[in-house]
Amino acid sequence: MQDLLERDTIDAVGDVRAAMQRNVQTLQSLQPEDQSPASWMAPAEEVMRNHREWVRLEWRDPGLQLQVGVDSPYRTPVFARLGRDNAQVEVAQACALAQRNSAAAYAPSTYVPLPDGLGLEVMELCLPWYQGGRVRGFLVASYALSEMLEAMVRREHTRAQEVSFIEPDGTRLAVRGGIHRGQRLFSAQQLLALPGYTLVLRLDSWRAEPNWWPHLLTALVMGLSLALVTVLAFLARDMRRRQRAERDLADALAFRKAMEDSLVTGLRARDLQGRITYVNPAFCEMVGFRADELLGQGIPAPYWPPEKVDEYGKRQAWRLAGNTPPREGTESEFQRKNGERFPVLIFEAPLINAKGLQTGWMSAVLNISSQRASEELSRATLDRLQATARLATVGEMASLLSHELNQPLAAIASYASGSQNLLQTQAHAADAVGAQIGQALDHIAEQARRAGLVIKSVHNFVRRRDQSRQAVAVQTLIDSIWPLVTLQARKTGVQLLIDCPTDLPSVWCDRTMVEQVLINLARNGIQAMQSLPAGQARELRLSVRPAVSAELGQCLEFAMADRGEGISPAVSAQLYTPFFTTKSEGMGLGLSLCRTVIEQHGGRLQHRAVWPSGTEFFFALALAPTDDNTSPQRQALPQS
Ligand code: ADP
């Protein structure tokens, strides 16, 4: 502020000095030369109109006597009241100096009282006028100091500041402008050295106490902006960190999800009330429910078998009471949405949150169906092994029996033929009794031969010898078994029916074994009808018909149908299992052997229910080759 004022003061003094210089030049141009005092008046008045700072302009002769004088048109003549004589000393002083210097000179200012009670500081300027090297006169101009300030100092300096002329001793001579706007005073002064007189120009400036309020507001706004920028910077950093953390979290979640989705183990989380809070895709696939069908479900869970709800509910309550489930897992059974049941192994662990509190249970669920199936398979294999071992023993026994029975049978046959020979040579041969005994002996011999053949076949079968195949006419097969079947049927009152066209081709088979199969099936059928109430039809029908099978192509199908009570699904499932029987005296080997025999012939032994009741067992036999069907062929087939 002070610096500014100092600069303004220098500028103002410069302005005043320049103006005074110009005024001196104006005066020089106004020198009268050859003019008369009267003619000089006009230009003098003209000049006075342009210079308010002058109050009077005079032309004096070299003796300082007044020739003519012009007062300022802007005010009442200043010297009118006291006359000009009072200023004679100052005029003389200035003119003496001016003459000495041959240049304009000034006299110290004097106070001139005015008629209105005020006064005016007036400074005399004297400019000598030469002609031919001699002083011809003087031009004396009287400056009013206050008007000088008005006319020569720029408005910008007087508007806000107080400009004054003071004596070097500090006496104030004239003052202009200035508004007192505060308590603080700044002031600057500069000397205005004039020939003959030195004035001081002073500038005073009042400044109010600095008003802190706007500054405070500005500072506040700046501070807040700074704080805002800082906060924004922190926010941006925080945002970046947060985004990084979110990215990491998303990665971790994606990793966890991929892990859960790839698991074949079902995962299930439940809260402490038993409500499902989480399931993974493997669990959904296991139970056949969608995740949204399971989430939020409480007790009973939708995959609990209805009849086990009580048991599972108790198990759940026990666990919720704070008991720890066994580490080796719990076996349980779940039910799929489609009603299918499957066994599961469940491992459970408490779910602990970040505060260390238990919020529920997390379970890993394993579907152990395939494990169970393989256990079942190995058990069945074991059973079959045992059965095979028993069969082997039976085979050994059969082999032993066949060996042992062969001799008595041979003896029976030879005794029978011996007896027949005797009968033929004796007298009884001709009579009726003899004929009957002869017939009986024939039968004995025939049956003994048959028994021998059966035993031989069994022996071969047990020893796994090659089976002897031959072309056998269907009628031959029927004829050889039918008497035996008739015997049994008659005992139980069963009616026998044969449904067999006469022109059927021969079949290619081990005759004895196939006869045994037919006898077995017929016996089973007859036995199935034993328990029927009296009066109900008891019928056993043997049908033979041409057929085409996948295994054998063109073939003959043999079917043995009874009218018994049929076979229940439970029995049906185990029908061909060795040693399975529902009869108290049964061996349970008949059907198993029959199936083996038929399979050895390349076919399949099957059964179906017949209407209105009863069962039909049926199988197919290959046709005998036609190129050599007159002589029976012996062909070895591989044993299965
Ligand atoms: P076994 O006759 O010694 O019992 P099988 O192997 O011949 O042995 O028969 C096994 C079981 O199959 C019988 O006990 C019986 O329950 C059942 N079965 C066989 N054939 C028939 C049939 N035609 N009708 C009803 N059940 C039958």
Image: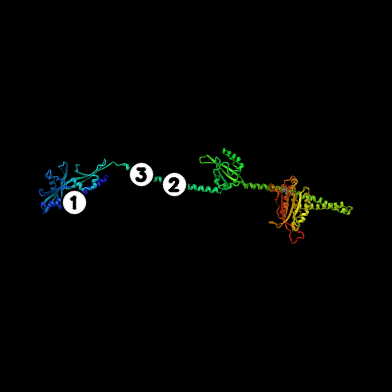
SS type, badge 2: helix
**Image location of residue 640, percent across then percent down:** 71, 54
**Image location of residue 308, percent across then percent down:** 61, 41
Q: Are marks 1 and 3 in contact (CB under 8 Å)?
A: no
Task: Residue 239: give its label.
Answer: 2
Amino acid at dot 3: Val
Amino acid at dot 1: Arg
Please count the marks in the image. 3
Whether residue 414 is visible, yes or no, is no
Q: Mark 3 points at which residue?
A: 221
Whether residue 495 is visible, yes or no, is yes
How many residues crowd around disc 1 within 10 Å: few (fewer than 14), some, or many (20 or more)? few
How many residues crowd around disc 2 within 10 Å: few (fewer than 14), some, or many (20 or more)? few
Is ligand 1 closer than 8 angstroms to the Cβ of mark 2? no
Quarter placement of the N terminus: top left
How many residues crowd around disc 3 within 10 Å: few (fewer than 14), some, or many (20 or more)? few
Is ligand 1 closer than 8 angstroms to the Cβ of mark 3? no
Question: Who comes first in sequence, dot 2 or dot 3?
Answer: 3
Q: Nearer the viewer, residue 49 or 350?
A: 49
Task: For marks 2 and 3, give the CA distance.
Answer: 26 Å
Is residue 274 rendered to the left or right of residue 115?
A: right
Q: Mark 1 points at which residue?
A: 22
Residue at 52% over, 48% down:
255
Residue at 71% over, 51% down:
616
Q: Do the residues labelled 2 and 3 touch (CB within 8 Å)?
A: no
Is ligand 1 closer than 8 angstroms to the Cβ of mark 1? no
Front: mark 1 or 3: 3
Amino acid at dot 2: Met
Question: Who comes first in sequence, dot 1 or dot 3?
Answer: 1
**Image location of residue 130, percent across then percent down:** 12, 52
